[in-house]
Image (spheres, rainbow, N blue to C red):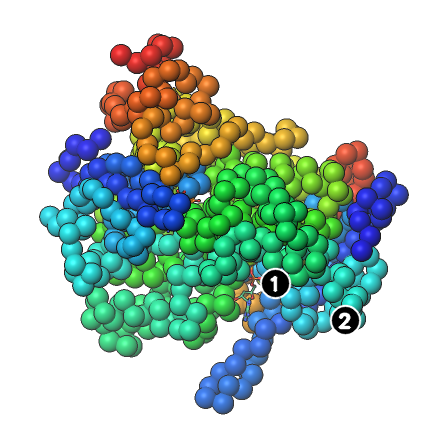
Amino acid sequence: MTTIAETGGDTAAGAPLVQVQDLEMYFPIYKGVLRRQVGSVRAVDGLSFDIRRGETLGLVGESGCGKSTCGRALLRLYEVTGGRITFEGRDIAELAGNALRDMRPRMQMIFQDPQACLNPRMTVGSIISEPLDEHHVATGEEKRQRVRELLEAVGMNPEFANRYPHEFSGGQRQRIGIARALALAPDFIVCDEPIAALDVSIQAQVVNLLQDLQEKLGLTYLFISHDLSMIRHIADRVAVMYLGKIVELAPVEELFNAPKHPYTKALLSAVPVPDPAVEAKRERIILTGDVPNPANPPAGCRFCTRCPDAIDRCSVEEPVWRNLGPAKGSNGTVEDHFVACHRVE
Amino acid sequence: MGTASVESVLEVNDLKTVFHTQDGTVHAVNGVSFALNAGELLAVVGESGSGKSVTMMSLLQLLPSPPADIVSGTVDFGGANLLELTPAEIRQFRGARIGFIFQDPMTSLNPVFTVGFQIMEPLREHMGMSKRAARDRAIELLELVGIPSASERLNDYPHQFSGGMRQRVMIAIALACDPQVLIADEPTTALDVTVQAQILELIRDLRQKLGMGIIWITHDLGVAAGIADRVIVMYGGFIVEHAPVDELFHNPRHPYTMALLHTLPGHDGGEASRLRSIGGQPPDLIQPPLSCPFAPRCAHAFERCGRENPPLRALRDAHDVACWWDTDKGEEWS
Ligand SMILES: Nc1ncnc2c1ncn2[C@@H]1O[C@H](COP(=O)(O)OP(=O)(O)OP(=O)(O)O)[C@@H](O)[C@H]1O
Ligand SMILES: Nc1ncnc2c1ncn2[C@@H]1O[C@H](COP(=O)(O)OP(=O)(O)OP(=O)(O)O)[C@@H](O)[C@H]1O
Ligand code: SF4
Ligand SMILES: [Mg+2]
Ligand SMILES: [Mg+2]
């Protein structure tokens, strides 16, 4: 296994680490006593994007729009319905045997439901060190030391290693999941709502940690979050999903300052502000209309049933994914701004 | 703040909960008192691990004992002390007159039953509804929380729902029987801002229509600012500050509350390269709470803080703080 220091460096920075083409993930729907398949939930329906080495790509969108499904598919936790995912240019669907085993520790996930992946019968120490055992990375005193460091890194008392998950609060359990994902020092981490259950101070601590690791080791993140102020802080580029599709993708400041897609605009208008005076007189774009069913998405643009700007054409013709041209990216780079909407010039 | 007003629907007095563990006694909740009025929304904020969930789970006898042990306290609801009820009696309250939304939607929904069954069950048990009526009500509830094509999803199992959809199912279950009191533990952590705004609207509506009193635990200070009437701040198993929402955000008086508000990332731009966090470690709850729990991290701490626990005292109208330092005068409180 090559370390990031060897493959990283300035030359490789900015090159795509993960490439996704036409990714589709459908879940079958069964009905009746015979459990016949009557349709499918099109959770992810044709996604194409790159994640550059060393960048943080933010992924935002409505609850149920397919963000977790996308993240899990990237790590090959599902057999995808269609499309291609490459990691360092290699198609991950074709990896098998040793190649797959070598790849696994390099890609990790911080799960949205930490409780669901913490074995209640294992101590916190063994939960965190399990990946170290599986990949024969460290043993004995070295392993114990590593567990202590990881616990400290996520702001927890290292003495807690002997306790069981149920003895912890929600936010403490979320941090155990983060420590576990970091154990193998992976290159790429899908962070699925990694800070949702944490108070602001610990959120800050965890986000600072993720950023420090990125700076030191060149880590790459797909950062799924509904916390838009945190996305603005941590992401380099942001992809906005709606009902199984990406509708807009732009450098972070461009997206927040000059959003183009009507869904992105509605989303940004709803961010709660920690000031009761501001909250009392704010104007949100409230989305009306039925939330469509991903098993039976509307024709044309998927947002047309709720879009404040919709015209007749929107319910007939699907808008194409267009490049609006270069915009200012982070660190003085220039990045493209993509959108799929008929009303954007 | 223990003063009972006529309209208070729930009153908690001197609640103390500990856990007996191998390493010793964990002092999770150290004498918490508060009252909830009909139709009001009381937000509870505070550090991760400060005892917010354990406080609320204690009220409803939801913690397995052992290891949990409620060592003191009374919880007055409709003339009964909830802590003295038998398991069968408290079951008549839970999910009926008091709705509860757990922090963790995956483990609190039963993976082997369909979502529809889990919403319909309390309706049939507590409201005596027929199967038909319960089904209609379940669909209505799922629609209220914004689940698309609700009727088609009743037969799905929890794992077929996204994280935020599961959380909304929990909200639907808690609201099913029109409770008088709703206790919601981080109910919107998995929701994007638009769905969250929709849920907050729904809650506002129910408060007005049904006069529901709500306890809303959240780490999202933006949400608290938007919906709360009053806010309680917890630290190390204590209530350290309590104030009306405007007062708390504009005139915080406890050093922890001030530090917490200070850590908020600037909401008008992600310019700062590093986020601020509160330095130091959270208190070790194995130590008996004989000093101010915040003292080791506090900018104002002085000798008395390490030796005596500051009681919650009234500063002015409806604003209480537990701190030996008088922030207004800049000297020890006297
Ligand atoms: N079964 C248990 N055994 C021992 N300690 C426990 C147990 N359950 C909870 N605790 C401890 O009690 C304290 C309070 O936990 P609680 O779940 O109330 O925190 P919280 O304020 O809800 O935090 P969060 O915001 O992270 O959910 C924590 O420090 C936790 O470690
Ligand atoms: N195993 C499954 N079987 C059937 N449907 C599924 C399954 N997993 C997810 N889905 C459906 O796929 C859609 C997308 O789910 P996903 O979990 O990816 O959403 P999400 O964007 O992560 O939402 P959230 O923000 O609420 O976590 C949802 O409609 C969900 O019900
Ligand atoms: S009592 Fe002392 S240590 Fe505690 S918060 Fe007040 S000043 Fe700080
Ligand atoms: Mg998700
Ligand atoms: Mg909690």
Determine if residue B41 is in view: yes
Disc 2 under 8 Å from ligand 2? The reply is: no
The answer to whether residue B21 is above or below residue A303 is above
- Residue at 17 percent across and 43 percent down: it is B74
What residue does disc 1 label?
Answer: A69
Q: Which mark is residue A97?
A: 2
Q: Amino acid at mark 1?
A: Thr
Q: Secondary structure at mark 1?
A: helix
Q: Nearer the viewer, residue A341 or B257?
A: B257
- Residue at 55 percent across and 55 percent down: it is A126
Question: Whole-percent x and y of residue B256?
Answer: 42, 27
Q: Nearer the viewer, residue B108 or A105?
A: A105
Question: Whole-percent x and y of residue A136?
Answer: 70, 58
Q: Nearer the viewer, residue B100 or A314?
A: B100
Q: Amino acid at mark 2?
A: Gly
Q: Quadrant of residue A19?
A: bottom right
Which chain's residue wears label 1? A
Question: Whole-percent x and y of residue A324?
Answer: 77, 47
Disc 1 under 8 Å from ligand 2? The reply is: yes
Farthest residue, direction bottom: A34
Q: Does A204 sit left or right of B258 as displayed?
A: right
Which chain's residue wears label 2? A
How busy is the neighbourhood of tag 2: few (under 14 within 10 Å), some, or many (20 plus)? few
**Mark 2 or mark 1, earlier in chain:** 1
Q: Which mark is residue A313?
A: none
